[in-house]
Image (cartoon, grey):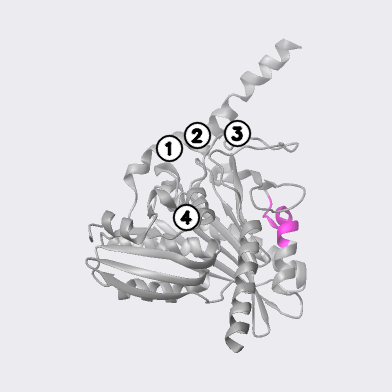
């Protein structure tokens, strides 16, 4: 439950910060994910890249809600791409898709963020 | 060769994770349905409702964590969660009923709840099992529940301890429930989960009245005013309307005889 197996790298793409997530996202990934968010600095949009996500449990979904609150507080958009069909369904089930923009590709997410 | 081994291990891990995923999460549902209503349970505010997470709630967002520390010798994390899933209703405080599936907690199952709120108000609502694996399980609330969010029950092993945990991520569903939480509802909820964890702990360490650590964090101080219309689904209002209609229903029943 508290295993930390996610690795996050942050890239800047114009006004957007892209967070590449690898491994398992669980409640134990809080520090890694929040550090990555902080590294994105003053980005107007945070784009989460889930292409290399292995596994996410309900603790991980809870973390995304916390991240969403932080992004909203700083008037940043939160977006995601690279989600498998399974995780798209999880986003729908938890109704997280109503607040996080889900896109098919990085290009589409950056376009929506006004970064290209 | 070593690189090949690493890749094989990585693939096996990925396959394991995928298998765990497929069985742990509930399937997508647009509206809730209850297959069978247990005797004594009231299915008033569940069927036809959508699930509602913290994003859909009205009030301030809270993360509340309750932890009970047990000796690792008395129970392992996996065994504790297995028992908790199997006998979930047994650990609830008196005066509240959890009508879960007979098979125990499993992803996608819907349970009905009959709760007692301050002022002895009876409330009928429910939850869906969003996620369940060997170490944790999560319940998500429907529209009209006191709060919009989820509750994760888990156990972890650290040093010589097994830590049982309840973590709630929630916003009050509507302005009425928000007021209720401010006027004693939060305290009552804290007592509810402390009591539950004590009941779980007593299962393994009967002689001890377990201490429960409580940590409350306000994740978002802002209220989502655009969600005030959630009040239309309020289980408190509909439960009250149902209770007030009891004499009329009784009279109708007598006339039909």
CA distance separating discs 4 and 1: 16 Å
In this rendering, position of residue A69 left or right of residue B73:
left
- Where residue B122 appears, as percent x and y from the top left, is 60, 39
Q: Are marks 1 and 2 in contact (CB under 8 Å)?
A: yes
Residue tagged by mark 3? Answer: B44
Chain under label 2? B
- Please, what secondary structure does the residue beneath circle 3 have? loop
Residue tagged by mark 2? Answer: B237
Chain under label 1? B
Residue tagged by mark 4? Answer: B170
Front: mark 2 or 3: 3
The residue located at (66%, 45%) in the rendering is B111
Q: Main secondary structure of the magenta part?
A: helix
Residue B102 within the segment the image draws in magenta: no
Q: Are marks 2 and 3 on the same chain?
A: yes
Q: Outermost residue, bottom direction?
A: B2
């Amino acid at each position: 439950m508290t295993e930390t197996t996610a690795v996050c790298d942050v890239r800047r793409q114009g006004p957007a910060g892209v967070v590449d997530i690898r491994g398992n996202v669980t409640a134990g990934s809080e520090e890694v994910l929040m550090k990555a968010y902080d590294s994105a600095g003053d980005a107007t949009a945070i784009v989460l890249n889930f292409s290399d996500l292995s596994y996410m449990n309900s603790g991980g979904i809870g973390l995304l809600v916390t991240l969403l609150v932080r992004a909203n507080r700083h008037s940043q958009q939160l977006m995601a791409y690279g989600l498998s069909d399974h995780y798209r369904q999880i986003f729908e089930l938890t109704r997280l898709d109503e607040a996080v923009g889900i896109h098919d590709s990085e290009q589409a997410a950056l376009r929506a963020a006004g970064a290209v | 060769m070593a690189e090949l081994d690493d890749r094989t291990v990585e693939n096996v891990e990925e396959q394991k994770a995928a298998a765990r995923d497929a069985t742990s999460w509930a399937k997508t549902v647009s509206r809730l349905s209850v297959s069978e209503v247990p005797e004594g349970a009231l299915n008033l505010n569940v069927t036809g409702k959508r699930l509602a997470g913290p994003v859909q709630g009205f009030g301030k967002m809270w993360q509340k964590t309750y932890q009970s520390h047990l000796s690792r010798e008395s129970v392992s994390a996996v065994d504790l969660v297995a028992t908790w899933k199997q006998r979930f209703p047994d650990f609830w405080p008196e005066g509240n009923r959890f009508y879960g599936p007979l098979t125990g907690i499993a992803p996608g199952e819907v349970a009905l709840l009959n709760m007692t709120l301050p002022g002895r108000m009876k409330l009928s609502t429910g939850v869906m099992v969003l996620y369940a694996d060997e170490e944790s399980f999560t319940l998500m609330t429907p529209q009209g529940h006191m709060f919009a969010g989820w509750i994760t029950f888990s156990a972890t092993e650290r040093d010589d301890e097994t830590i049982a945990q309840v973590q709630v991520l929630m916003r009050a569903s509507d302005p009425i429930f928000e007021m209720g939480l401010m006027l004693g509802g939060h305290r009552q909820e804290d007592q509810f989960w402390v009591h539950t964890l004590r009941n779980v702990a007593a299962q393994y360490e009967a002689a001890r009245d377990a201490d429960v650590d409580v940590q409350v964090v306000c994740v978002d101080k802002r209220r989502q005013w655009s969600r005030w219309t959630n009040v239309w689904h309020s289980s408190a209002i509909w439960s009250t309307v149902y209770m007030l209609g009891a004499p009329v229903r009784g009279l109708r029943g007598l006339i039909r005889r």
